[in-house]
Amino acid sequence: MLAPSGDWDWVWLSQVLPLDIVDRIASVLPPHAALGRDRPAWRWNDSREFSSSSTYMALISFNMVSVSGIWKCIWNLDITPQIQTFLWLTRHEHLMNNFECCRRHISMNNLCPICFHEEEDVNHVLQHCYRARQVWLQVLSGVQLQYFFNNSFEDWFDANIRNNVNHWNILFAMICWVL
Ligand SMILES: [Zn+2]
């Protein structure tokens, strides 16, 4: 499954697997000696060994984050499920972009295709790229401008999704979707 370069053999994989499976493989780094022996591992504790206590904690954590947290805010927005899913993937930085493609050795170019000055990650595309700034500056009020571009991506995203004054969170979601 690996090419001589050490990357996934995309030609071979795309010939023998459905595209959705190939896309899922793209989210996993190929095995490498520096990363240790490739083996199944339990993701929910540091030892990577299964335990019922870590399973319990993972379930508790999943409920807190996914149901009671930002997901609940996204789910309650009066927008299409497609945009809700987009927002969820955005918040967890699971959207494919040039930065992610580079990190996974799918591409050599990590630059934003709009400005060609910064890495194209989700924070840049939605918050800091000049095109995004031009759009946000058209809709932000003076008070919002004081903090809008200064927060970390997670704080920025969560604060805007939770801000329902004058349905701001819906406008925020729609703008993120079109950016
Ligand atoms: Zn840019």
Image: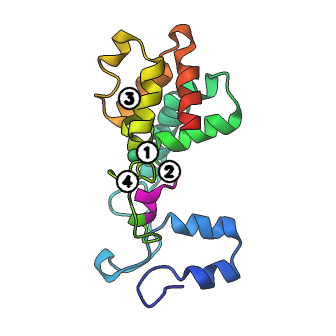
Foreground residue, 82 or 21?
82
Foreground residue, 22 or 129?
129
Q: Residue at x 32, y 83 (%)?
A: 33
Secondary element under disc 3, as helix, strand or loop, is: helix
Foreground residue, 31 or 53?
31
Write down the residue under mark 4: 116
How far is the residue under mark 1 from the one under mark 2?
9 Å
Report if residue 96 lies within the magenta region: yes
- Residue 176 location (% of width, % of height): 53, 34
Secondary element under disc 4, as helix, strand or loop, is: loop
Q: Earlier in the sequence, mark 4 or mark 1?
A: 4
Q: Earlier in the sequence, mark 1 or mark 3?
A: 1
Amino acid type shown at disc 3: Trp
Circle 2: is it few (<14), some (14-19), or many (20+) Cα within 10 Å?
few
Report the side of 31 relative to 59 (left or right).
left
Write down the residue under mark 2: 94
Q: Earlier in the sequence, mark 2 or mark 3?
A: 2
Residue 26 in view, yes or no: yes
How far is the residue under mark 2 from the one under mark 4?
22 Å
Q: Earlier in the sequence, mark 1 or mark 2?
A: 2
Query: Could you tell me if the residues under marks 4 and 3 are in contact, i.e. CB atoms within 8 Å?
Result: no
In which quadrant of the rendered view does residue 15 lie?
bottom right
Ligand 1 closer than 8 Å to label 2 CB: no
Write down the residue under mark 1: 122
Amino acid type shown at disc 4: Phe
How far is the residue under mark 4 from the one under mark 1?
15 Å
